[in-house]
């Protein structure tokens, strides 16, 4: 799936071969995998974990934000 993580200052990550995204949801952690159902959710302060096919996991700290999942694309607007 395609993933973009954007902050007001810059683009933290953009990529196409993401297998899994783990997010700090407002009510608890949750994961998004390929072909996930459409979703919009609020994020709290925490770590975003990204698993990329055939590569190591990446981690990003965020202070909150919003995530949108639609048509196998994930857009994270992070603080």
Image (cartoon, grey):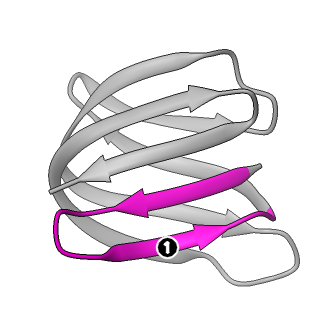
Q: Residue at x 88, y 79 (%)?
A: 54
Magenta stretch, main secondary structure, is strand
Q: Say which of 36 and 5 sits in front.
A: 5
Q: Residue furthest right?
A: 54
Percent from the top left, x then y, of residue 48? Answer: 39, 59
Q: Quadrant of residue 10?
A: bottom left
Left or right, 59 with respect to 9, comes to right
Residue 22 versus residue 61 in the image, above or below: above
Q: Residue furthest front?
A: 9
Where residue 63 appears, as percent x and y from the top left, is 11, 56
- Could you say which quadrant of the image residue 41 lies in? top left
The local secondary structure at tag 1 comes to strand
Left or right of 14, for residue 71: right
Which residue is at a point 38% across and 73% down the rendered structure image?
11
The residue that mark 1 highlights is: 13
Q: Residue at x 69, y 83 (%)?
A: 56
Q: Considering the image in quadrants, where does the C terminus appear?
A: bottom left
Instruction: Residue 6: say if magenta.
Output: yes
The quadrant in which residue 8 appears is: bottom left
Viewer-proximal residue among 35 and 57: 35
> Above or below — where is 44 with respect to 62?
above
Give the x, y percent position of residue 69: 57, 29
Magenta residues, start to end: 2-17
């Amino acid at each position: 799936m395609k993933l973009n993580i954007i902050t007001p200052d810059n683009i933290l990550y953009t990529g196409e071969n993401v297998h899994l995204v783990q997010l700090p949801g407002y009510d608890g952690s949750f994961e998004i995998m390929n072909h996930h159902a459409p979703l919009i959710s609020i994020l709290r302060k925490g770590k975003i974990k990204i698993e990329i096919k055939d590569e190591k996991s990446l981690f990003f700290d965020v202070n909150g934000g919003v995530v949108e999942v639609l048509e196998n694309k994930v857009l994270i607007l992070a603080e």
